Amino acid sequence: MWVLNLSIEEIDLRYVPASCTSHPVIRLKSLLRSLSERKVATIRIIFRESDIPMGIMEFLLKSHGYIVIEGSRLEDGSIQVSARRSS
Amino acid sequence: MTVTTSQKIRELLRSHKQPSREAYFDLENSGLVLEEVLEFMMPYFNKYGYGHPSITHKPGWEALEVIYETKEIVSETINAKNLESIVFTHSGTEANNLAILGYLLKNRAKKGKVVVSAIEHLSVIFPAQTATELFGFRVQLVPVDEYGFVDPEILKYYVDRDTVLVSIQTINHEIGTIQRIKELVDTAKSANPNVVFHTDAADAYGWIPLDVQKLGVDMLTISSHKIHGPRGVGALYVREGVDLELPLKGQLSVEKYWPGVENVPLIAGFRKAVEIMFKDFESRVNYVKKLRDKLLQGIIDNVPDVLVNGPLGELRAPNNLNTSFLYVEGEALTVELSLHGVYVSSGSACTSRVLEPSHVLLAIGRKHEEAHGSILFKLSHIHREEDINYALEVIPKAVERLRKISAWK
């Protein structure tokens, strides 16, 4: 049976506690695999470009099967992107 | 009455008992010093070269002699042109700190960007983060692929005119990924010819050929205990023209970048270990690779639900095997194996004080539960086929026993 998955999940990578594994790149890599496996339809990510350049964010999303559909800059200078599952 | 920590440890050891056979595969966390190395270094404690190497008397000159002999042999093995470019520290961690903090301290007025890979040793990541907090540098972590490789095309996004320092490991200490360092150096230097490139080669030295001229690196870290030398000695290669500021303050002896008296007996041990590890280099490496492959195949054939962390083939360190045993907690498995005399480590904790999984395993996209079940084996020429056979006899039973009582199933 085919089930339409319209789930949306948000990841905020701006504020992370200091630890070995909390850097936005490490958190994102770990989370993307889980989101991709759960076939989450849309993800919204808020991040600082100083942590992850926009081009890299697009690359990482694409390598996990997501395409950026919109992006905007928030008041605090961080970026919010929405990405949709491509297949 | 309060039970002291040492009493608790004694009780733990008493209840552990002596296993009938032992095989030590935790060469990542603490090397095993070879007998020949021990024999060579012992006289330097009280019979020969026990003096301060910068004082003008016979025991001092003897100490100075072994320091320079070691610089010579290390220089030769990495093709460094100048003996003064080899700086001894008291560990690989200190050498990494000297490279990162020493360079950033010297260049603190620039306040630029520091680029390191997401799977670097914490002795690179933490000093880089400290420089951010203290001097206003910005640190960026470069993501790696599922095998731990840094893609030069990705690195291009990070290195620009603002970048002052790049640090990427030659071989990853946990998953054994051999980076294409020459290509990464070329990429970084094409984007910014002024960038200084450091590589932590502690896990590469003695295992793959290293030539600082061909690689084009500006700084390179080495650690004695990773090649069966004693713990307590590290070295940093610093290319002529790269200037550092001492992160540690105190009276200088022989080394211009590291204060305090050089640890001469341990440097002597390091010298001997280098001599041994670079003799019959290729046949030793091939021997270890065969043992590693036998261990890997034996685990895959005899234990279900196992993942290999890191690449397979020629781009994996010949002495490294890192596997995740699913539905098992890594630390529980290290204890279970220890009871049978097989000593390994786990990536279930990023440091012994923090119960977060290894940042390396998360950075290659492993889930927490996969990282928690990881076991790292480091092999060497000290191992015999019987050690591998014994490990393969013990591991499947230990995993099976723990899976039976695991809550993760």
Image (tube, rainbow, N blue to C red):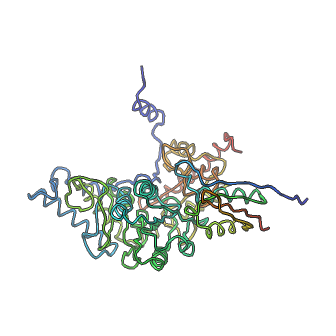
Which x, y percent locates residue B277? 36, 66
Location of residue A61 with respect to B39 vertically, above or below: below
Furthest-front residue in view? A75
Left or right: B290 as drawn, with respect to B326: left
Query: Residue placed farthest to the right in the image?
Result: A1
- Image location of residue B254, percent across then percent down: 20, 61
Q: Is residue B130 left or right of residue B147?
A: left
Between A17 and B355, the one lying in front of the other is A17
User: Which residue is nearer to you in this view: B6 or B157?
Assistant: B157
Q: Which of B344 and B103 is in front in this view?
A: B103
- Vertical side of B41 occupied by B73: above or below: below
* Residue at the image point whose x is 47% and y is 47% from the top: B21
Image quarter of residue B84: bottom left
What's the residue at 49%, 63% (across, down)? B172
Q: Position of residue B190 (x, y in %)?
A: 47, 80
Q: In this view, does B288 lie above or below B31?
A: below
Is B236 left, or right, of B381 in this rendering? left
Q: In which quarter of the image is the N terminus of chain A?
A: bottom right
Q: Which residue is drawn at 76% across and 60% down?
A: A42
Locate the C terminus of chain A by quadrant.
bottom right
Q: In which quarter of the image is residue B5?
A: top left
What number of labels is visible? 0
Residue closer to the observer: B232 or B250: B250
Q: Position of residue B296 (x, y in %)?
A: 58, 61
